[in-house]
Amino acid sequence: MKDFSVLKLLDKLAHLFNKLHVDYPTMRRILQVKLLMDERRVPTILSNSQKPEGKNSFKSSLFLYGFIGLFIGLLMLLPLPLFVTMNIVFGTIMFMVMATMISDFSTVLLDVKDKNILLPRPVDSKSVNTAKIIHIVIYLITITLSISGPALLIGSIKHGIVFTLIFLIELILICFLVVFITSILYLAILSMFDGEKLKDIINYFQILLSAFMLISYQFIGRIFDLSRVTITYDPAWWHFFIPTTWFAAPFTLFIEHNFTGFFTWSSLLGIIIPGLTTLLYVFLVMPYFESKLQKLNSSSGHIRQTNIKEKLQQAAARLLCFSPTESAFYRFTQNMLANERKLKLRMYPHLAFAIIMPFIIMASSIKNVGSFSDIISHIASGNYFFGLYMTAAFLAITPTMLSASEEYRGAWIYRALPIESPAPVLKGALKALLSRIILPVYLFTALILILICGVRIIPDIILIFINMLILIMLSFKMNNKELPFYRDFQTNQNYTVIGVMILLFIVCGACAGLHLFLQSITPGVAVNIVASLAILSGLWYKSFHITWKDIIKNSL
Amino acid sequence: MNSSGEVVVSIKDLTMSYGGNQVLKGINLEVFKGQIIGYIGPNGAGKSTTVKIILGIVDKFRGEVKVFGEDIKSGIEYKRRIGYVPETAEVYETLSAQEYLTFIGELYGIDYATVDRKARKLMSLLGIEDVYQARISSYSKGMKQKLLIISSLLHNPDLLFFDEPLSGLDANSVMVVKEIMMELASQGKTIFYSSHIMDVVEKISNRIVLINDGRIIADGTFEELKHKCREGSLEEIFNQLTGFDQHQAIADEFITVLEEG
């Protein structure tokens, strides 16, 4: 089996472990297996065993973190007071490390399978627990270093060796704090809710992290615009409560030689608090944590609030769907969208992106900084709401995401059940996606734009909505007519999706262009609405002439 | 019962509760060398909990459990002589069979080359050698079950805990595994066999222990139980002893509901 260089490094400490009465060879073997499984965290559930084992997904994720790290490193170049810079840098690092701990590493922290596999074997629990702790430490160090490496490098070049030393020490302290906060968070959730709820919350963190990554790319280029802003820093008493100040203060102390009381006390807090929390963690949290873990696999089978929500859903299904099959798949899709965590993880960051896009465009087109009210009135009178077309384009891609599912094996029902035509299946699913995801997201974004630009844009909002529906129909038509939730996430179909995306953006641009042109003529928007509606109804009518033959042809 | 042999497992006044719920209410049991114990009972009766306690997966129980004459709280050495097939297929699915089995073997202190050779041979005997290097996540239910059986026997243990070991296996494999169990028992190995399939338990075990609601309610050979209960099959004995006599009524009502408009 593959030998890891980390383990070879660890071999040098073998004596130490033996002194602590840890069975080193066993522990090493467990760690080796754990590290191997980390590399394969994204399992390739393919029946074809001849396929190459896939690339190392852990390493490629490190690469991504390194990229984010570069972004954090660039922050070091801002002409801000060192204390402010370090606050921002450590704040971002803490957020990233914590979010990754929660989203990616929860599988390790919360593993109960481990117990059932390892404990029946002649392995003492001390070795198992040590292996677990070392595993977490290795993971934490790799992630932290790849996130903060660029900042460390840039800072060291700028401020010298003192910076390097302080930075490394602070990183260790931050790691201690992060582990403590993460486990406290888990503990709180586990003692209040059951395992399922915890999985939900982990899912939200994963979504948050993905959305953060996606959106932060948009800002990288804009960092240097900030450099014109001048900020000075004045300490206030409540700053003591912000953890990043504790870690940023030593830099002021030792690099800027500013030994004011505030910075000294903050620096001390930065040592005392992580120290205290670590003690708390080892002696109080950890033992308690293990006993709570058992709850993870249990679900208290809480009763869902069926009444109003379910009735509304059923009413909507009756209203929107014309056949029993269609309304059955409408409800099925709604439920899947609400419950499938992996699908949410795919879709929600994308939605966040769709919401924020118009505002990013808006922000980047403001060049001359005037007063705040000037900017607002400038935006309100302009055509900045056309950014909503970006939202429309991103939302129009969502139907392509509907065909993948974690539970894709359940898709045998499509073949086994007496469903005459796939049209109602696809129609029901699409309508559910529209009513549950697309419509709320669109309305939310549009509402904010109306608040900024005023009610005058309502006709435009309506037109953009109809144009979006046209885009959705196009993406639906081109998406190989795939059944909902029938294939694995792993099956690669990026090729088609990218094709769909390019086409959607072209059509979207054309729609926006036409809209912009007709806008200047008085009944222009109304004419456009009528024309778009006509195209839409034509597309809707034509798109659902689907037989099982089409489906089978495409899925083979 | 042949109480002449060596005592392999002895359990005294074993109680256990999860939260406020008492799962085991005082189990007393002595198991002798070479026995195949059919350990049966309804869902939630406490079968798995007993086994998990003996294996050291669950602690915080009350009472005394001795395996091979040693108190299980005093160390882990006894686990070297135990093999376990869990009910739910708990394995590291991202690993290949080779990686998993060699890992488990090495935990028992067998060196890599030996366990690799042994595991491959056992896999080929059960007809799954071709997936030895494939990831377990790609296995069918039956293949996974075979893997679990192999992983429990690699170190040639003296005491076996088999929880539904035949689930998902085809008829031919079932015969092989049954034969293996018989052979092992005749060599003096002890087997704890839990299952819900009464026909198999009836045929394979030479002693049946029936547990219900955290207590042992019957213990003896099949013949003894048959004599005591005046019933013909283990299934009927099971129904009688666990106080379940409504299967006919429930089935009838079930059909009635199906026929409703």
Image (spheres, grey):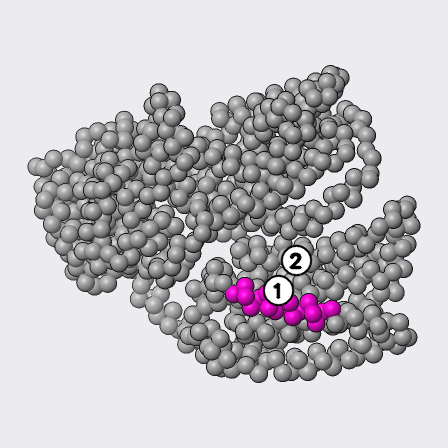
Quarter-of-image position of residue B255: bottom left
- Image location (x, y in percent) of residue B4: 8, 37
Asked whether, in this view, residue A149 is left or right of residue A362, the answer is left
- In the rendering, which numbered label is found on residue A398? 1
Q: Kindly state the secondary structure of the residue where label 1 is placed.
A: helix
How many residues crowd mark 2 within 10 Å: few (<14), some (14–19), many (20+)? many
* Residue at 69%, 74% in the rendered image: A470
Residue A168 vertical placement versus A495 (above, below): above
Q: Kindly state the secondary structure of the residue where label 2 is placed.
A: helix
* Residue at 22%, 59% in the rendered image: B127
Q: Earlier in the sequence, mark 1 or mark 2?
A: 2
**What's the residue type where badge 1 is placed?**
Thr
- In the rendering, which numbered label is found on residue B169? none
Seen from this angle, which residue lies furthest left? B4
Closer to the camera in the image, A293 or A192: A293
Asked whether, in this view, residue A335 is left or right of residue B132, the answer is right
**What's the residue type where badge 2 is placed?**
Leu
Which part of the image, by quadrant, shows the C terminus of chain A? bottom left
Residue A128 vertical placement versus B234 (above, below): above
Closer to the camera in the image, A320 or A403: A403
Q: Chain of mark 2?
A: A
Q: Would you say residue A362 is visible in this rendering?
A: yes
Closer to the camera in the image, A407 or B220: A407
Q: State if disc 2 and disc 1 touch (CB < 8 Å).
A: yes
Closer to the camera in the image, B43 or A423: A423
Residue A145 vertical placement versus B249 (above, below): above
- In the rendering, which numbered label is found on residue A351? 2
Specify the segment rendered in magenta: A493-509
Residue B61 vertical placement versus B142 (above, below): above
* Residue at 57%, 46% in the rendered image: A64
Q: Is residue A285 magenta?
A: no
Dominant SS in magenta:
helix
